[in-house]
Amino acid sequence: MATPTRHRPSSSVGEPEEAFGKEEPPSGPPAAAARKPFRLSTRGRKLTLALHILSSVGWLGLSLSMATLALIGYLTSDPGVAEGAYYAMYIFDESTVSLVSLVCGVTGVLLGCGTPWGLMRHWWLLVKWVLSLGIAAFAWVYTHPLVLTAAEKAAAAENGVYRPGPEGTLLAWTVPPVFGVLVFVGVISVYKPWGRTRRGRRYAQSLAAAPAPSSGPGSGSGPGAGPVRAGDVQVTVEAVDRPAEGVVGLRLVPVSGAATEPWRPGAHIDLVLPSGKVRQYSLHGDPADGSAYHVAVLQDPQGRGGSVEVHGLSVGDRVTVRGPRNHFPLAGAPAFLFVAGGIGIVPFLPMIEEARRRGTPWRLLYVGRSRASMAFLPRLERYGAERVFVYPRDVTGRPDLAAYLSAAPAGTAVYCCGPDGLMRAVEELMDTACPQGVLHLERFAAAADAAAGENLPFEVELGSTGAVVGVRADQSALDALRQQAPALTASCEDGLCGSCELRVLRGTPDHRDHVLSPAERGRTDVMYPCVSRARGGRIVVDL
């Protein structure tokens, strides 16, 4: 019988509506801070993007017209028709096509240089730029003189019969493929299929290694934001929306203009708010889109203030982001069952898209107080009633969890995120209703651990210096260690986020966190000092 596995739950620092999830991004070699790049304003970016899209569509239409005229000139035997087709190509190429391609190219370069995409930082953009430039050069160097020669030869046709010469043949066999290349460039623009170039990776590493701007007037960090850490990224709130009652969605764009750090479904970021509060929120949106982070937060007036502060943010405000991290990754499995409660739907949005991309069967069970309170519901219902099962409790009551779990195919990965009551219910049902599945949980807040032992005093020895720090029975190891290392990294301090992870050199940890799964509780190489303690009186750590 499969043992339910609780994979790396994460937290919103005790506020039950806020989310979560985490894995330290790879650090790159130290590098000098990059010069602040040229950046289009929000209005300028929107105007430039609109011009780029319009000129791109116009270029595609004109290219299709040119391909059609080239084929007409090649296939017709009427010299008048051939001459008209080639002269039309010449006029298009000399006037309209040249202007449209110029506007498309200039706006494309502006978007590449003045947005987080970066002209040479992503392969998809680099390939698109090279192909577009090649098409423009082809038109000026090759097509432009050739169509005029073809038109003149058509006008000089003898006996009223036109037979295409080498010029007409070349145009017929080259201009239509150029249209195909332009279509390919358009597909690249929409789907952005490739990641960063080597230059882009170096640039991202240099940003991560460079110190972030310090707090101060106008910095958006606020007086209580605390020390700036390596890897902190200043972001601007570029857009605010309301996907459901009591829920706010934020689009966060790096102030530097650089691309966001790569992330995978299930990841979260730490948001350092202007007050200094640090909260964890799951990411949604397209992981391949490096232009912004997207989070959605439910307001909890009875919480500890983080969600209320997030709901007070406006377009133009600046906050700090740490991460992304991922302790809730999408596993490889033959099928997925996603069980979401309320705002717990957020990490499942990119997971569903990833499951669709893999071609893996999936189902979603979505529970909420009411339809109005359930975020992203219209988007999810477009997947179809055979995949998405919606339970607004004011209308339908509670779902039969056991029925959904028992219907899961063998090997199904069951993912659950939501209020503690829902997660406990799913966890308790796994052994009986779904022994064929494997459970993955992500918590909003720390759950009581019945297996936790008595709090006894112990000592933590620092492997680097040999210093010994005493931990009282009423004190966490994290608080005690901060006497030696005041800047010791930690976010939730509830054993959920994993940001305070320490490497254990000797001794046996008493794991009381919700980061390690039950199968990992025997590990002796790591501990989370915000809640975990030591067995045997002393533990040696690498601080």
Image: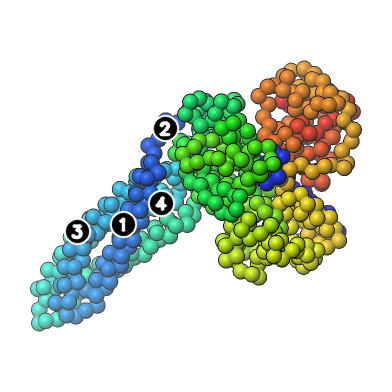
- Mark 1 to mark 4 CA distance (whole Å): 19 Å
Could you tell me residue 41's position as x and y percent?
38, 41
Q: Nearer the viewer, mark 1 or mark 4?
A: 1
Amino acid type at mark 3: Ser
Q: Which residue is mark 3?
A: 95
Query: Could you classify mark 1 by the number of other residues whose Cα lies within 10 Å: few (under 14), some (14-19), or many (20 or more)?
Result: many
In the rendered image, the vertical position of residue 413 relative to residue 258, given as above or below: below
Query: Could you classify mark 2 by the number of other residues whose Cα lies within 10 Å: few (under 14), some (14-19), or many (20 or more)?
Result: few
Query: Could you classify mark 3 by the number of other residues whose Cα lies within 10 Å: few (under 14), some (14-19), or many (20 or more)?
Result: few
| SS category of the residue bearing label 4 | helix
| SS category of the residue bearing label 3 | loop
Q: Earlier in the sequence, mark 3 or mark 1?
A: 1
- Mark 2 to mark 4 CA distance (whole Å): 25 Å
Q: Earlier in the sequence, mark 1 or mark 4?
A: 1
Q: Is residue 162 left or right of residue 529?
A: left
- Mark 1 to mark 2 CA distance (whole Å): 29 Å
Could you tell me residue 168's position as x and y percent?
22, 70
Q: Earlier in the sequence, mark 2 or mark 3?
A: 2
Q: Which image quarter holds the N terminus?
A: bottom right
In the rendered image, the vertical position of residue 132 relative to residue 119, given as above or below: below
- Mark 3 to mark 1 CA distance (whole Å): 14 Å
Q: Earlier in the sequence, mark 1 or mark 2?
A: 2
Q: Which residue is mark 4?
A: 127
Numbered badge on residue 36: 2
Of residue 201 and residue 303, the one placed in the foreground of this image is 303
Q: Earlier in the sequence, mark 4 or mark 3?
A: 3
Numbered badge on residue 55: 1
Question: How many discs mark residues in the rendered view?
Answer: 4
Residue at x 18%, y 68% (from the top left corner): 88
Q: Which image quarter holds the C terminus?
A: top right
Amino acid type at mark 1: Ser
Residue at x 17%, y 63% (from the top left corner): 91
